[in-house]
Amino acid sequence: MTSSPPAWIVLGRSPDGLVSVALDADGAEIERRSFDDDALPGEIRRVEDAGGPGPRWVWSDTPEWYERLLDEGVRVARCHDLRLCHAILRDSRLVADAADLRAATAWDAAASVEAGRDDQALFALEDESPARPAGPPSSVAAALEEFARQREAIRAAADPGRLRLLCSAESAGALIASELRHAGLPWDAAVHDRILVDILGERPRGTGAPARIDELAKRVRRELDDPTANLDSQPKLLQALHRAGVMVHSTSRWELGEHEHPVIEPLIEYRRLSRLLSANGWNWLSEWVHDGRFRPVYVPAGVVTGRWASSGGGALQIPRQLRGAVRADPGWAFVVADVAQLEPRVLAAMARDVDLAAAARGRDLYAGVVESGAVSTRQEAKIALLGAMYGATTGDSGRLVPRLRRTYPRSMALVDAAARTGEDGGVVSTWLGRTAPAPSPAWMTAQSRASDADATEGDVTRARRWARDRGRFTRNFVVQGTAAEWALVWLGDLRARLAAFPRTGDQASAGRSGASFAHQAHLVFFLHDELIVHTPAADAERAADAVRGSAAAAAGLLFGGFPIDFPLDLRIARTAEKS
């Protein structure tokens, strides 16, 4: 290396192997090194072990590069994920001219692992996006070209600081997602089995159902007076219910609960236990839990708001009943933390609403709203705020939201403006600059057709409904997306703090968590506003302090000195089970 330390090191492939290109802070090339593929871990380790803040690694797609490094016991402090940042910058309203980024369609690639059925979409759009190529370009030439485009887009942006922070947080999230999968969530298969037996009955031999599910199925068929009723087929079950006089449109728990009939109670319980068996039963246990670890596949930015998704294992949908199976290793502990009322607090900070921030300060936000006189009960406060953020206009939400507009006009004006923008076909952005997708061509055509002289009543009704749906989408996009940004900054700051801890853990964990995490506190779980740290028991209090400090740091990085706090429900425990 030269005496001038690099700010960035771009990694990529060439016909002869791998290439690293060191760049200074202005993007000028300092040094270029070629090496064999087998030498990659050593090259990374050499730079990371040099001390100091070190350069930021620039690569095409984090899973493609980082998961191999973790297998070799090598971690990196910082990176810039070109694929994820391309998606942000290509669409951000803060970017003055994104034409070059939009033309670089090879970077519109899917994640290395596509989001699957666990994807928690905010709202379904009118049509599906076209299929994208799998994996972005991996050549060093393509990486250098794309990195130059991204640096220029940020430099010329309306607010470079926000986009720079967003790209850094998004890239840190990509590192964390790979590390979560590599280290795994400690999981006791024997406890999981006991929980299933307690709830479902003994594991059946062959293809039969567990005893309790079988008993419930017999009760349901008896109450339906239909011994052959197919309880696992929605259309056939609805037909059987209708024949029994239960006139429902769906088999959701909420709709079934509105009817009085002897079949309702056993049917709801049957469906609950059947979901547990299919989603997290013995087959799931044998497929996803090995060597005392559950290793799901996380997909950063798998949802348009920037929230994570998962493509396997159901990491975002672990049932409450099974959290007792999440158990720390001997000599270790968990720090479990989640943020109280994250989205309403984010809304207050975005709107600079000092009144809503005061209601949230040092206490339950909903209780603070009640104390302000806006509503009478905590439940009403929750319904009203969620209704305001998600666009509920009927029932209790429709009745209560106008009261919030009188008490907290700044916050309500922010989400109302976002909704109007969406209804008019515009786009909105999060606090740091992630921008919502534009309306689909089908949406635009429907709105245009509704204004034609020969438009039918059906055309007008459809256009209005689609406009309201999009308004609800944009109303919540700005809040949910900004909350996702806060959580990413929280995670990224915490990851750095934990990495600075001394390595003190028991060697017995090495085979399960991997060499990189065997002796040190590390993140093992993340879900929107909740995280779990696995830590040597002796470091638990220090890890808890790091979690709190990172939450405060995230608030400062995003919202400066605005007086909003993000209190944590935090506990140190041997299991993740909530009391």
Image: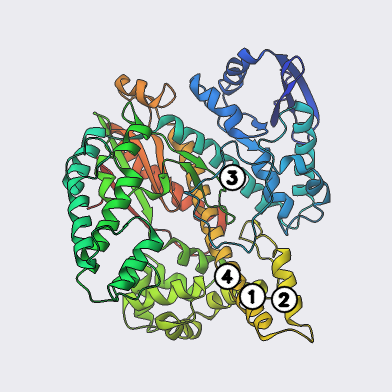
x, y percentage for residue 231?
A: 31, 57
Question: How far apart, in angstroms, are the residues tagged by discs 1 and 3?
Answer: 31 Å
Q: Amino acid at mark 4?
A: Arg
Q: Return the mark for residue 467.
A: 1
Disc 3 residue crowd, few under 14, some 14–19, many 20+, Cα 10 Å:
many
Question: How far apart, in angstroms, are the residues tagged by discs 4 and 2?
Answer: 19 Å
Q: Closer to the camera: disc 4 or disc 2?
A: 2
Question: How far apart, in angstroms, are the residues tagged by discs 1 and 2?
Answer: 8 Å
| Local SS, label 1 | helix
x, y percentage for residue 108?
A: 71, 44
Tell me which label, 3 or 2, sits earlier in the chain. 3
Question: How far apart, in angstroms, are the residues tagged by discs 4 and 1?
Answer: 12 Å
- In the picture of the structure, the residue carrying the numbered disc 4 is 475
Q: Amino acid at mark 3?
A: Glu
- In the picture of the structure, the residue carrying the numbered disc 2 is 447
Tell me which label, 1 or 2, sits earlier in the chain. 2
Tell me which label, 4 or 2, sits earlier in the chain. 2
Q: Return the mark for residue 224.
A: none
Question: How far apart, in angstroms, are the residues tagged by discs 3 and 4?
Answer: 22 Å
Residue in the foreground of this view, choosing between 354 and 276:
276
Give the answer, above or below, for where 521 lies relative to 398.
above
Q: Are marks 1 and 3 in contact (CB under 8 Å)?
A: no
